């Protein structure tokens, strides 16, 4: 399938960018996290508290497997932890063109200051973000057909850059 798949750390802007790309290209948009929370009629935090992270990760895998079989091209925003799961690592490249929205530690820390993310509850935000970024960045980079840095240029310019790079990748594949 040739979906456009958006990956990146929490706070990188995956949903906002994905919605804008889908709007500009006239494609449907799917946010995997939101699809799961809608299906269960619970918040992310409630799902993690009631069922635990492994249950949530299994739902992510089921959701991207369904999307991999969907013939209608879509823009798909993946949850920040989804690429870290081994069972998803064969599925992601098969979904289509992968766009990694990379954020600097400073940009992401600022955006995540007042977050209610269950992954950042346990310990000091700054330490947790640094640790997770160090672990996740190489994994995100390994999937990327396109990489852009967020927090540097205006939103509209970032989206235009992504669309241009996606076009180049898809033309050459």
Image (tube, rainbow, N blue to C red):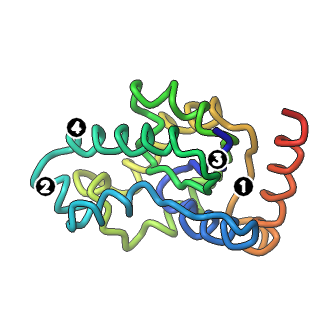
Image quadrant where one finds the C terminus? top right
Specify the label residue 149 is tagged with. Answer: 1
The reply to whether callout 3 and callout 2 are in contact (CB within 8 Å) is: no
Q: What element carries label 2?
A: helix
**2 vs 1, front mark:** 2
Q: In front: 80, or 19?
A: 19
Residue matched to label 3: 3
The reply to whether callout 1 and callout 3 are in contact (CB within 8 Å) is: no
How far, Cα to Cα, is label 3 from label 4? 26 Å
List x then y, in percent, for residue 104.
Answer: 63, 54
Give whichever of discs 4 and 2 has the lower sequence position.
Answer: 2
How far, Cα to Cα, is label 4 from label 2? 11 Å
Q: Residues within 10 Å of mark 2 (few under 14, many from 20)?
A: few
Residue matched to label 4: 54
Q: Residues within 10 Å of mark 1 (few under 14, many from 20)?
A: few
List x then y, in percent, for residue 38.
Answer: 30, 66
């Amino acid at each position: 399938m040739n979906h456009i798949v958006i990956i990146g750390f929490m706070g990188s802007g995956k949903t906002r960018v994905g919605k804008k790309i889908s709007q500009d290209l006239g494609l449907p948009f799917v946010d995997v996290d939101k699809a799961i929370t809608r299906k269960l009629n619970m918040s992310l935090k409630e799902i993690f508290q009631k069922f635990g992270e492994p249950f949530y990760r299994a739902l992510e895998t089921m959701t991207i497997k369904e999307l991999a079989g969907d013939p209608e091209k879509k823009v798909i925003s993946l949850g920040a932890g989804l690429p870290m799961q081994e069972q998803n690592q064969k599925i992601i490249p098969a979904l289509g063109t992968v766009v990694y929205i990379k954020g600097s530690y400073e940009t992401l820390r600022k955006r995540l200051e007042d977050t209610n993310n269950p992954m950042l509850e346990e310990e000091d935000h700054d330490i947790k973000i640094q640790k997770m970024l160090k672990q996740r960045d190489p994994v995100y980079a390994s999937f990327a057909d396109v990489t852009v840095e967020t927090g540097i240029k205006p939103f509209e310019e970032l989206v235009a850059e992504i669309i241009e790079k996606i076009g180049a990748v898809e033309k050459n594949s």
